[in-house]
Amino acid sequence: MGELMRPDDQLIISQAMASEHRKHGARPTRASLRHFPAGTTIFDTESHLSRVLFIENGWTISSKTMLNGTRIVTDFFLHGDVLSSASTSMSHETVHAVSDVTCYEFQGQMSGVGSDGGSQLPLIMTIELMKRHARIAERLASIGRRDAFGRTGHLLLELAIRAGNSKRPGLDGFECPLKQSEIGDALGLSTVHVNRVLKEMRLGGLLSFRNGIVEFLNRRKLMELVDFDPSYLTGSSETASLQEIQQT
């Protein structure tokens, strides 16, 4: 392969495909532009067609439903993230859109040939699996060792980084389409408990979550209180790992 991929190259490739589509009115080879309205099931446990999605805009949730009907939210996927039907099928997860979602879809098996983003699919998927593993490991640490305040604050700080800068001038925060029940299902907390924690954060001058907007009133202090280290989202060790992959 050529130049070493940066940790966020899947976002760059997704943006490049979108730019190509806008400039020429045509889709990249093998990719189709897809739109999923909020509430749509994108993948379910019965999905058999192999598909890879590059999310350009919107939020999705992956979840598992237990035999007693309890739902567990396993992950969140935002712009720049990659979804694989093969991966979610293996883990028996359902993926649905919590906001309107625009993405590029590749169907069929991944190959190493092609003149566009498709030729990078195997490496991109490797990067995405590494990043998702880091996110889930941190979530397990939260559920196992952090209290409700720590879990909630840590997750919202993570989502803030992944969501990127807000388009609202002067806002230290991000637009968040998640319901409190969905946050609770990701953290092993009831909706009532999440509501109580958010109120505590607001009264403590740390964070406000109203009308779909998360605003940090004192982000630095919140990071200190919940021991938030964002390196697991951009880990420097990832570059070394990718160097090894490209040399094999």
Image (cartoon, rainbow, N blue to C red):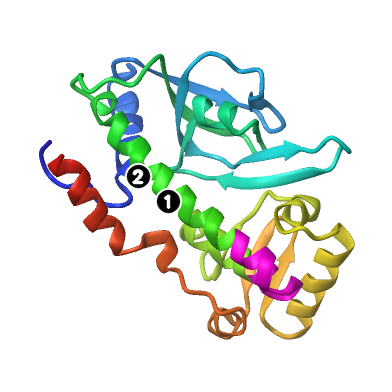
Q: Is residue 192 above or below residue 110?
A: below
Task: Report the residue at 34% width, 18% height from top.
Answer: 27
Residue 131's tag is 1
Instruction: Name the residue tied to disc 2.
Output: 127
Q: Nearer the viewer, residue 132 or 105?
A: 132
Q: Main secondary structure of the magenta part?
A: helix
For residue 150: magenta? yes
Specify the segment rendered in magenta: 140-153
- Whether pointer 2 and pointer 1 mark residues with C-beta atoms closer than 8 Å, the reply is yes
Q: Is residue 58 above or below residue 35?
A: below
- Quadrant of the image occupied by residue 26: top left
Query: Is any atom of residue 16 visible in this view?
Result: no
Residue 247 point in image, percent of width and height = 13, 43
Assign a secondary structure to mark 2. helix
Task: Report the residue at 33% width, 50% height from top.
Answer: 8
Say which amino acid is labelled 1: Lys
Q: From the viewer's perspective, tell me whether residue 81 is left or right of residue 184.
A: left
Residue 175 point in image, percent of width and height = 61, 55
Residue 32 point in image, percent of width and height = 42, 18
C-alpha span from label 2 to label 1: 6 Å
Task: Report the residue at 29% width, 16% height from top.
Answer: 29
